[in-house]
Image (tube, rainbow, N blue to C red):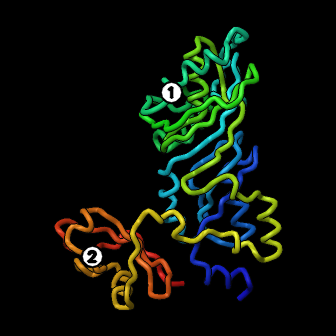
């Protein structure tokens, strides 16, 4: 067995916090990580457009089963918005659909409309997006000349700040919930100003617990892979699960969980009322390895394994 194969057997999984380069798709990064690490099962925790850079959590091995904990978490972005033109993609990669004179727009005017884009807002995703319709991404339909109309949906903007003004461009820092589209915000701001605008730059600065200051670039990952030290960069399998209470299982309970069997109420040492139905815990072996996520059953019936991490 060669060294890469040995690593795959011994490596349960974890996360890499990658700073995605501009021009790369999220899938490009996944392919690169697969090639560099030799790990067969690799995914990402939230798509970034090629125009964007910044935090792209990469899930390795068993961590792919926890990608949703990243996808559904809050994100933070730094947007560069350019006034004076709208595009079909809502960013600088698309074809211009409208041009206007934006020279009269002031920083005060932009600042005055930002409150309408905070809190719970209605936002229509771009036609050129990875949202699927009939099994096909919308961007494929749009590129094929099919007219795509997207339905508005509610998204949450927790913070929105104007941080730089250099007309015709300005910079916004934003913290938002799942499903938010920075391109749609840029387009909507242009419309709210009575003109046109599009996204000309985007950096994701945070995705859940993953931050830009701790992200590694592709060159660093390549160097570490060549040295054989890439695993030192990997964040633990339970990195995104710290909001859940922890429990340690003895070997008998561990075997039951590995076989997909439920544990009786009280098996984790909990008292009545400690957990409501659907409450979850992260379960560990006595050696400290993550074994499973367990869910509290209705009426105190016990604990059902919902995600099981097998040995090896």
Which quadrant, please, contains the C terminus?
bottom right
Seen as rendered, the residue at the extreme left is: 299
Q: Give me the disc on residue 306.
A: none
* Residue denoted by label 2: 270
152 or 185, which lies in front? 185
Looking at the picture, does residue 142 appear above or below residue 240?
above
**Left or right: residue 60 compared with residue 85:** left
Residue at image point 34% right, 86% down: 253
User: Which quadrant would residue 202 be assigned to in this image?
Assistant: top right
* Residue denoted by label 1: 117
Residues at marks 2 and 1, CA–CA distance in whole angstroms:
43 Å
Q: Position of residue 103 (x, y in %)?
A: 73, 10
Which quadrant, please, contains the N terminus?
bottom right
User: Which quadrant would residue 52 be assigned to in this image?
Assistant: top right
Q: Position of residue 234 (x, y in %)?
A: 65, 69
**Left or right: residue 170 compared with residue 186:** right
């Amino acid at each position: 067995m060669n060294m890469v194969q040995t690593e795959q057997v011994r490596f349960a999984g974890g996360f890499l916090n990658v700073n995605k380069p501009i021009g790369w798709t999220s899938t490009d990064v996944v392919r690169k990580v697969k090639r560099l690490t030799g790990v067969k099962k690799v995914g990402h925790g939230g798509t970034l457009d090629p125009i964007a850079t910044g935090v792209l959590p990469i899930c390795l091995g068993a961590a792919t089963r926890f990608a949703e904990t990243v996808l559904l978490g809050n994100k933070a972005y730094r947007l560069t918005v350019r006034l004076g033109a709208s595009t079909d993609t809502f960013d600088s990669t698309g074809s211009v659909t409208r041009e206007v004179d934006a020279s009269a727009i002031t920083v005060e005017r932009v600042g005055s409309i930002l409150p309408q884009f905070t809190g719970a807002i209605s936002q229509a995703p771009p036609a050129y997006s990875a949202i699927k319709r009939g099994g096909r991404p919308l961007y494929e339909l749009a590129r094929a000349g099919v007219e795509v109309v997207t339905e508005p949906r509610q998204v949450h903007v927790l913070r929105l700040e104007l941080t730089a003004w250099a007309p015709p461009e300005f910079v916004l820092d934003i913290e938002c919930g799942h499903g938010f589209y920075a391109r749609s915000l840029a387009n909507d701001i242009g419309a709210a100003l009575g003109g046109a605008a599009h996204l000309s730059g985007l950096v994701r600065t945070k995705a859940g617990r993953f931050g830009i200051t701790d992200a590694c670039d592709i060159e660093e990952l390549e160097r570490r892979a060549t040295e054989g030290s890439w695993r030192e960069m990997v964040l633990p399998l339970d990195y995104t699960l710290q909001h859940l209470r922890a429990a340690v299982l003895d070997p008998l309970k561990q075997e039951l969980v590995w076989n997909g069997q439920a544990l009786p109420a009280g098996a984790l040492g909990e008292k009545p009322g400690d957990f409501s139905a659907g409450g979850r815990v992260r379960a560990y072996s006595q050696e400290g390895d993550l074994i499973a996520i367990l869910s509290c059953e209705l009426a105190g019936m016990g604990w059902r394994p919902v995600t099981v991490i097998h040995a090896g």
